[in-house]
Image (spheres, grey):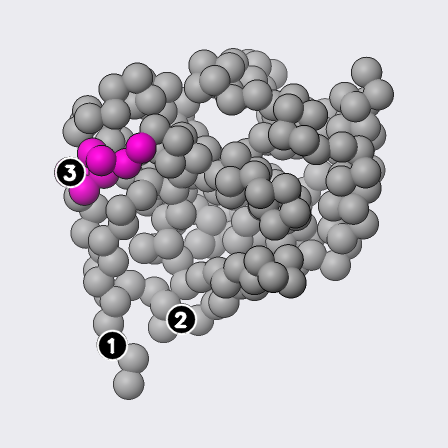
Amino acid sequence: DVKPIIAIPTTAGTGSEVTMWGTVWDEVNKKKYSISDQKLYCEAAILDPLLHISIPKEITLQTGLDTLSHSFETIWNKNNNEISSRYAEDAIQTVFKTLPLLLADLSNVQLREQMLLASYHAGIAFSNTQTSIAHAMSYYMTLEKKIPHGIAASITLPYIAEVYSRENNFSNNLLLKLKGFFEECGVSTNLEDYNLSMNDFDNIFSQLNSNVRAQNAVINFKELYNLIRNQFEG
């Protein structure tokens, strides 16, 4: 028998309290595995922002960015639907508004609560769609370059957003807001700042066609590759 799960999240990032997924990271063989089972859905979740007061700034940032990535990847996704979009858009606006303030006031319970709810809403959103290309690209960065997951899963978002905006009804104002958000949080989106090279992205893109998460994406891989290559050559 499987015991019911009562989840009490102690970070505001994964949203796993409302998904049926888990991960196993094999650092020896440089592989990340996903597990999926209906039995991993929680019977109940307790969201208590008081448990988050002691989270350090770096973890607060990284998990907050993971929430943002989950939200955008829900929208840029073949499995997207009206309900998932609604939750994702709500989470995006909350993270934009809240995370920069929280990074300057880590003990603020109200801000912690808002980020916890954003993570929860993002979890509901991507539980309908799975993640997509940003997460697919991030696994190499974390396993090979030791870039923390939340950073690795988010630093390509402005590049993906730019490609997406060329072919879809994506607000240029939102794209500019996304770029400004990273600056406000003190996070560089210059890929070279993370000891990444074009050779790394050659390796990353060579693996995307066989990556299940990447196949959820609604963007053109070639255009994204060329945009990233232009940064390194520029």
Q: Secondary structure at mark 3?
A: helix
Task: Residue 221: give x, y in percent of width and height.
Answer: 77, 40
Q: Which residues are magenta?
A: 49-56
First in residue order: circle 2 vs circle 3: 2
Give the quadrant of residue 77: top right
Please report the residue visible at 51 percent of the width from the left and 43 percent of the height from the top: 149
At which x and y percent is residue 182? 51, 20
Give the spatial CA distance, label 2 vs label 3.
29 Å
Camera-side mark, 2 or 3: 3
Residue placed at 17% from the left, 29% from the top?
Answer: 109
User: Mark number for residue 31?
Assistant: none
Q: Is residue 30 left or right of residue 154?
A: right
Q: Amino acid at mark 2?
A: Gln
| Residue at point 23%, 53% (across, down) | 8
Q: Which numbered marker is on residue 50?
A: 3
How far is the residue under mark 2 from the one under mark 1? Answer: 13 Å
Q: Residues within 10 Å of mark 2 (few under 14, many from 20)?
A: few
Q: Is residue 52 left or right of residue 29?
A: left
Q: Is residue 229 above or below residue 32?
A: above
Residue to which mark 2 is pinned: 38
Secondary element under disc 2, as helix, strand or loop, is helix
Judge whether residue 51 is colored magenta. Answer: yes
Q: Which residue lies most toward the bottom here? A: 1
User: Is residue 155 located in the magenta-colored stretch of the structure?
Assistant: no
Mark 2 and mark 1 in contact? Answer it, CB < 8 Å. Answer: no
Q: Position of residue 138 (x, y in %)?
A: 61, 44
Mark count? 3
